[in-house]
Amino acid sequence: MADDAIAFDAAIAAGGPLGGAETAFVALAEALARRGHRVEARHRGAAATTHKGVHWVPLPAASPRRCDLYIGSRGHRVIGPIGRARRRLFWLHNPARYLRKPRNLWRLAWHRPMLVVTGAYHASTVPRWLPHAGCVTIPYGVLDRFRGATPREPPPPRASFTSNPLRGLDWLLDLWERRIAPSVPKAELHIYAGAGVYGALATKHAAAMAKVLARAEALGRCGVRRFVPVGREALKTALEGARVMLYRGDPGETFCLALAEAQALGVPAVVTPLGAVAERVADGVSGRVVSDKCAFAEAAIAVLRDDDLWRRWHLGALTHQRGLSWDMVAARFEALIG
């Protein structure tokens, strides 16, 4: 396995904040190792190490001459550096239109990997003429710590936002200030977001992120609370105290692990059908998928106020939205070896 987008490794994943794609990369590597495979993960970390059965090797490094399964993740440089592989995959985490760039196209044409996408919306972004050996859909898994939740009593009127601040947070702050907070005066909106999650990739967007987050910090009078990004265990604790996750979505959202984790814990969600987020919520069962601002605000206000509605969506999420375990996901990758 290889990913050269952001500097991370298993130690960072174990305790620090990490984006969805990085979390998925580590979780899949460790799940494959638990299933008895020898797994080598190439990354942009500082040193070689072995963690939970996965051999982490910094890039660049000499590639092994052969392997049974090679999984390149995201970047064009890792589409196909292995000499011989029984099965070569290219795991996509973003809309696939970026593959039209020449630096990606010639590597795809030369190596002909099978493309792995995470859902129906994600698959729709793959250009039909793109050279590859096929396209398979394998959703992200959900870490076990999020999948074992039991029914609980309604929490205080506390909403949560745990995604990239450039993916609709400004839009949500508008609605919160003008519609939601005035209707539920004791409600709070807790934001766990920041550029630190995205490493060097966030540099060109750091100023825009800072502007949105500064606005959030200025809305304390409306119950908005901004927190720094946290690791998965601390995030689980925060979500267990949340009454609802509010997220507009974004065309760049191809899975949304943040929503999947919240729903697995039994946190209702209100979203719009932008990107893949509608695939993460069972409309009317574990939350609402709405088409406009008014309906979004109404659904958010309703779940923040109504304990019976909250219980119905909470139990619906626990029953239907646990998601796949990473062991299940690893088995699907394993089956592709042939």
Image (cartoon, rainbow, N blue to C red):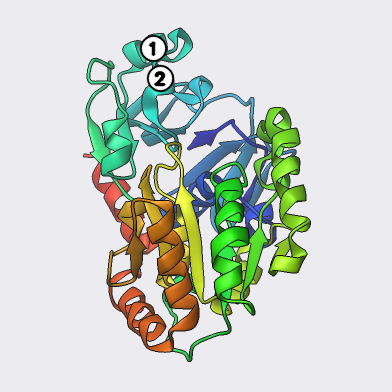
Q: Is residue 132 above or below residue 25?
A: above
Q: Please tell me which residue is depicted at 60% across the width and 70% down the height of the picture.
A: 182
**Image coords of residue 22 (percent x, y):** 55, 46
For label 1, the residue is 105
Q: Please tell me which residue is depicted at 39% across the width and 14% down the height of the picture.
A: 100
Q: Earlier in the sequence, mark 1 or mark 2?
A: 2
Which amino acid is tagged 1? Leu
Q: Residues within 10 Å of mark 2 (few under 14, many from 20)?
A: many
Q: Is residue 118 above or below residue 270?
A: above
Q: Which mark is residue 99?
A: 2
269 sits left or right of 204 in the view:
left
283 sits left or right of 174 in the view:
left
**Image coords of residue 69 (percent x, y):** 36, 37
**Image coords of residue 160 (percent x, y):** 57, 66
239 sits left or right of 188 in the view:
left
Distance CA(mark 1)–CA(mark 2) = 6 Å
**Image coords of residue 280 (percent x, y):** 35, 57
Is the residue under label 2 in contact with that under label 1 (CB below 8 Å)? yes
Q: Please tell me which residue is depicted at 46% across the width and 51% down the height of the picture.
A: 248
Q: Residues within 10 Å of mark 1 (few under 14, many from 20)?
A: some
